Amino acid sequence: MSSTERTDGDNGTDGFVAEWRNGAYNCYSSGHKFCREVCPVMQVTRNEVHTPTAFHANVVAMEKGLLDIADVARDYVHCTGCGACELRCPNTLFTGDFYRFRTRTVQLVKAARALAVDQGIHQPGWQRWVEETSRQKSEPVLGAEVPVSQEHVRDWAAGLDLPIGGETILFCDCEGAFHRTSVPRAAAKLLQRAGVEFGLMREQWCCGGPAAEMGYVDRAREFAKHNVDDWRAVGARRIIVFDPHDYISFTEDYPSYFGDEYDFEIVLFVELLAELIRDGRLPLTHPVERTVTYHDACRLNKRKGIHAAPREVLRAIPGLTFKDVDHVTQWSYCSGAGGGLPIERPDLTAEISRRRVERAAALDVDTLVSACVWSERPLTEQRGALEIMDLLEIVALAAGLEDER
Amino acid sequence: MTSTLVTDPVIDELVAICGPDNVFADRSSRVNRARVPAPFPVHRWAEHVPDVVVLPTTAEQVSEVVKLANRHRIPVVPRAGGTGLTDGAVPLRHGIVVDVKLMNKILEIDLDDRTVTVQPGINMLKLNEELQQYGVIYPDDPASYPCSLVGGRIGTSGWSLIGGRYGHTRDLVISFQIVLPTGELIWVGDGGGRKVRKSSTGYQLKHLFMGHQGTLGIVTEAVLELVPRPEAEFAAFFSYPDYETAWRSTGALAKSGLATLAGVVLFDEWKLDYLRRDDEAYIPQPDDVRCVVATAMYGTTDEVRPGAKRLMRIGKDTGGAYLGDEISQGDWASRHDRYATPLHGRLRDGQVVPMSWHCEDASINWSQLPQVRREWHEIVARLGDNFRIFDDWGMFAYTNAAFKPWGDYLTEIDVGIWEQELDDAAWDAWVTAKRDIAAVAIAHGGSISACHGACRAGEVDLVPEELGGGWDVMKKVKRVLDPLNIMNPGKYLLDEAYE
Ligand SMILES: Cc1cc2nc3c(=O)[nH]c(=O)nc-3n(C[C@H](O)[C@H](O)[C@H](O)COP(=O)(O)OP(=O)(O)OC[C@H]3O[C@@H](n4cnc5c(N)ncnc54)[C@H](O)[C@@H]3O)c2cc1C
Ligand code: SF4
């Protein structure tokens, strides 16, 4: 037997291959790599094993006994889950309607990671991260001002007088709750100003999205179940989220866990915000004298097709000079913060962010505005002369809820 | 599936040359660099897996790797984008894959003498994104524009969609640095000056070192042409009731002498049938539209506007009906992506199956197009009679000359192949068909390949016939420059050079 033949079959791998082989062959039989140069990770590593083409071909190779999940588990770490490749893929672009088919590389990567975990192949950083999250119920946010724990999960809201429970819940992401607390504070104040009634959860746990992305599906479900139970217990119908990653969890992962009984309305903050401003319920009265460009959050722009609302909001801010880069050009931009990459490959995240900031700086702006709280840390670390702001932070300025520092 | 030449000490040496982060001997790295998009039996994937992959960052590293390979007599295969359709980057004899993707820097932009100097791992779309701010472009524009790389463009001597106006890769690459098969680094161009486009000094070596599919060395740096970003673009599509009229009209348009005309493309009836039945993105046309001719012009507004009027008149006078702005502009703009649409085809009973795309790409003179077309469709029809996994996706003929759109045509027959079902018998029949297709091209005074190269099983058998006495020279050159047959062995029947 030659040195590259897989020795034994196993059920986990067989099930994975059975589920993914058709999609994989759709890519394998074209294999032209139109997706390659749009991938933020590939743009840095230039390594073909980090491409969607390889991610799909590996499935065929597993079917043919050429590769094992053990051979490729590490390759699948190299994905931020941004979704650019799916948009660039002609299988999605041009044959999608014909086939009712869409290239689902992001889901494939998640499935491959789950298979690895299932087979006992762990990435040390991810394993620690998920264990810590399980212990503390929130992610082990690095450099948090307060220790990450249930006791402190609502500290960000100190002094805002927010009720617990109610029909509408504001879900606060872990990074926002413990690190960039100015974002949830801005969110809460904006809702209060616009007269939107809302409350917080009794006990908020991590949405489970990161665990799911790292392949720890059972853990992710535990978090999801807890959160859904908590929503039900307070009679919630509507969940407002400002973090795009949570938005993906609640609109894609949770429905897949709970099926039809999952009937919550999930509201994305920036879309609500655009509506409130448009309807005159949230007057923006304070000029913000900044020159900004907008970083399309990948999970909004590339995964959900949401790129108009953030721009509408920015254009409504008085005093602001907005230098836009269109959302299609931004398919190939990313902060590198997604998909667990910063935990396993912080070097790549840093480089991806550096390049993103460099592109912004070339526009002669003073501020790069993002709508994804997770992107803001790596971008800030590379910011140079730029300031990195969240969209909600800048809107809070325009609404007169905060003062320019 | 691997050769035994790459031992641990060799890997250590490679690590010493390229650095520990840029040498990969793991299974995934190797298995994923065994293939290119051209259809090949899936069950034979393991046959072409390399032993080790390196991602060098400098010309000196490439040179040292090639010298090492000579010392140990290990095959070396250059790999750029891995999109080549003649298997050039497939490591037939295993060995070391030199993947140039990490060498993707722009080294100099010279707006005075209109050149950009790059490393070979850069992609044209990415390059043009950077050039945009200077009002210039590098106009090498294959249908693989978003995915092929400059090194592979030189390795294949590629063809550009707008070559009739701006030239093809060989015209657009002014000079380059190449690591010879024995490891020496040299520059070749027209003469010696790196930014000189035309010289009469010495032999014209630039052409020799292009299109050799990595059998004569590895390009490590290239000086490329910059042209003004076209101010105006005009595309017009015409429809015809029959092939004969469309073909004559194509000839008239191509010979118009309009300097801004970048290309004329003829779609035959099979192509239209295919687009109608299986291309969701194709804008539907009435049934009496049997053939289509697409044209495009680029240049300054002052030239393109009046030129377009003349073009429209020629199209109409020669029997074409204008298909309207939507299809003209929309279809032309998406030409790159549309190429990759043939990802599914049909069995004769109408069942839709995922199919790989094979593209035959001979150069054929205009006068011979109708006959070649007839014979090629017959070959593919016979194939389909015997094996259900082949589907005729029709033909395109694209103007093929550089800077002038007349004369010969990149003549393409696209064949869908259900790759998963490609067993040995079907593969053998396919190879025979490819040989027959190539024979038709030669019999009509054409050339087997206008853009991809002619390395694949079947067609490659006829390369000596096409080149005649030139084939003997080719073998001599190979033996002299690569005495140990290190560079991409097994390609182009060049083993014969050592017999
Ligand atoms: C969808 C699609 C559309 C296409 N359309 C066109 C088209 O319109 N026109 C056209 O010309 N081609 C086309 N092709 C074919 C292909 O894109 C070209 O042949 C391209 O030039 C290959 O470039 P690459 O970077 O992918 O090279 P690879 O496939 O990696 O390599 C091609 C050859 O060059 C050699 N090589 C690679 N790098 C170097 C180097 N640095 N020095 C020396 N040799 C090297 C390789 O060994 C190999 O023999 C198309 C392919 C696809 C998949
Ligand atoms: S663009 Fe789509 S089909 Fe092509 S290689 Fe990428 S994932 Fe595969």
Image (spheres, coloured by chain):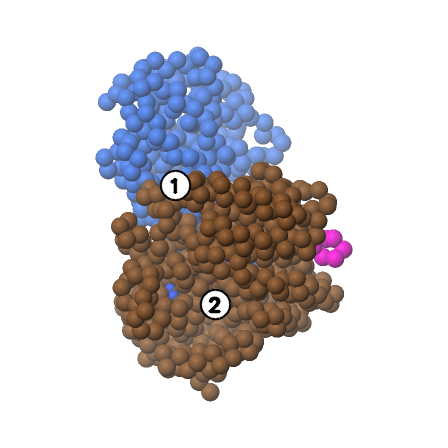
Q: Is residue A350 left or right of residue B294?
A: left
Q: Position of residue B474 (x, y in %)?
A: 44, 78
Q: Amino acid at mark 1?
A: Cys
According to the picture, the residue beneath numbered tag 1 turns out to be A334
Q: Amino acid at mark 2?
A: Gly
Q: What is the drawing colour of chain A?
A: blue
Q: Disc 2 beta carbon < 8 A from ligand 1?
A: yes
Using the image, determine if residue B43 lies above or below residue B325: below
Q: Residue furthest bottom?
A: B499
Q: Residue at x 74, y 65 (%)?
A: B385
Q: Nearer the viewer, residue A128 or A170?
A: A170
Using the image, determine if residue B20 lies above or below residue A337: below
The magenta segment:
B344-351
Q: Position of residue B194 (x, y in %)?
A: 28, 62
Q: Is residue B418 left or right of residue B175?
A: right
Q: What is the drawing colour of chain B?
A: brown
Do discs 1 and 2 share a chain?
Answer: no
Using the image, determine if residue B210 lies above or below residue A302: below
Question: Quadrant of residue B57 in the image?
Answer: bottom left
Is residue A210 covered in magenta?
no
Q: Residue at x 66, y 51 (%)?
A: B291
Which mark identifies residue B88?
2
Q: Residue at x 67, y 59 (%)?
A: B392
Callout 1: chain: A
Q: Badge 1 local density, few (<14 within 10 Å), some, or many (20+)?
A: many
| Magenta stretch prevailing secondary structure | loop
